[in-house]
Image: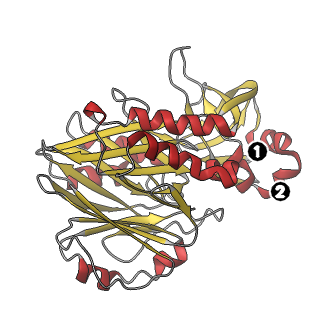
């Protein structure tokens, strides 16, 4: 596997490349720059490549975080191959049909992994994952994230081998026995306050906690910060607690709210009858979680991967501030300085919590998918 990276501070044409035979170019960047992407000029450099990416709330380029940039990562597979799928995401579909369409479009033979990007503002990513998983062969792993656009929570563009569109989802299938893939996902947030019972919810909409409006309850917790919802809530996600003490918690952050209903739209489904706990961050715990995710994503024999796709939560970046790059430095220190790291800050992450679990939606976590060929 060969990887080439470019960092652009404007949507400018490139004039040279080392990997003219690359099959995939990952593109992450600010929504305004992505809208101006000179796709046809890039396609002249990489004529065999699928161009896949999305809007970001900060671009991850190796161990650095950039704002208002475009990152391009060209990937040339030498003993493996790729397939590409795109599906419409509409408000009339909860996401399951969109996910199923992606899964059915990917040839099943030798499929090892699917990387998926979607717009979480128009469909429920949890339902999309169900539809995708139901149509994929057993044992295929999944990772990805929700497109983002700073703290605007609107117009989250997806680049799906054509001009950006915020009404779709895109998937890249990775194929072949030569592929080595590692995955790690960690949260690092700390709980506070009492546990609350979800007394009314539907899909990824949360209406009531302990019989009270979820919005009013959250506004009390946030105090003066309540006027800046949903942006202010990114520092205070929710943990949906597992039914058993040994189960894994899922983290949910708020994407929008409805003042009339007193409800929230969350980044993923929330189960009625489950318990939730509010979360807050200690910077050292977030950085340690990034290290642990990197350890989990190591390839067999702790070999340095050629590429790691890193999807982190926007709330982590807001909380860490000037220390945000410490997460990325931990990843490079753990996986190897020769590795190319590419990714973005997202509204949610799609990844399994461990290698033997199904892919889930996570809010404000950090997800790492490492790749190499043998």
Instruction: Note whether 320 is above or below 196 in the view shown.
Output: below
Mark 2, residues whose alpha carbon is within 10 Å: few (<14), some, or many (≥20)? few
Q: Residue at x 28, y 48 (%)?
A: 114
Question: Label for residue 227?
Answer: 2
Give percent across and percent down for residue 62.
44, 57
**Residue under numbered circle 1:** 215
Give percent across and percent down for residue 351.
41, 40
Give percent across and percent down for residue 361.
48, 41
Instruction: Note whether 269 is above or below 241 in the view shown.
Output: below
Single out the residue that lies furthest toward the right: 224
Q: CA distance from mark 1 to mark 2?
A: 12 Å
Image quadrant of residue 85? bottom left
Instruction: Note whether 366 is above or below 165 in the view shown.
Output: above
Residue 273 in sight from this viewpoint: yes
- Nearer the observer, 122 or 59: 59
Image quadrant of residue 88? bottom left
Q: Residue at x 76, y 44 (%)?
A: 215
Assign a secondary structure to mark 1.
helix
């Amino acid at each position: 596997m060969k990887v080439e990276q470019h960092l652009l501070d404007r949507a400018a044409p490139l004039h040279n490349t080392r990997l003219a035979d690359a099959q995939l170019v990952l593109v992450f960047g600010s929504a305004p720059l992505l809208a101006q992407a000179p796709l046809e000029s890039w396609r002249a450099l990489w004529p065999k490549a699928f161009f896949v990416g999305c809007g970001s709330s900060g671009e991850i380029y190796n161990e650095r975080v950039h704002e208002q940039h475009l990152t391009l990562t060209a990937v040339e597979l030498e003993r493996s191959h790729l397939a590409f799928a795109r599906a419409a995401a509409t408000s009339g579909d909860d996401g399951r049909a969109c996910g199923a369409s992606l899964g059915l479009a990917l040839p099943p033979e030798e499929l090892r992994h699917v990387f998926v990007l979607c717009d979480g503002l128009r469909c429920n990513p949890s339902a999309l994952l169900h539809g995708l998983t139901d149509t994929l062969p057993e044992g295929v792993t999944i990772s990805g994230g929700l497109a983002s656009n700073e703290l605007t929570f609107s117009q989250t563009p997806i680049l799906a081998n054509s001009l950006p569109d915020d009404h779709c989802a895109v998937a890249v299938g990775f194929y072949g026995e030569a592929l080595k893939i590692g995955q790690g996902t960690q949260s690092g947030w700390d709980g506070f306050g009492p546990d609350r019972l979800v007394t009314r919810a539907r899909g990824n909409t949360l209406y009531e906690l302990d019989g009270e409006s979820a919005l009013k309850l959250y506004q009390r917790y946030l105090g003066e910060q309540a006027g800046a919802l949903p942006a202010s809530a990114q520092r205070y996600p929710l943990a949906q607690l597992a039914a058993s003490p040994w189960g894994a918690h899922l983290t949910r952050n708020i994407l929008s709210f409805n003042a009339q209903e007193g409800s929230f739209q969350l980044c993923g489904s929330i189960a009625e009858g489950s318990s939730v706990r509010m979360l807050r961050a200690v910077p050292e715990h977030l950085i340690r979680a990034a290290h642990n995710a990197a350890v989990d994503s190591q390839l067999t024999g702790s070999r340095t991967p050629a590429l790691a796709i890193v999807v982190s939560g926007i709330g982590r970046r807001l909380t860490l501030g000037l220390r945000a790059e410490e997460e990325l430095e931990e990843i490079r220190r753990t996986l190897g300085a020769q590795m190319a790291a590419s990714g973005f800050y997202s509204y949610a992450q799609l990844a399994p919590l461990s290698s033997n679990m199904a892919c889930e939606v996570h809010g404000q976590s950090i997800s790492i998918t490492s790749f190499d060929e043998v």
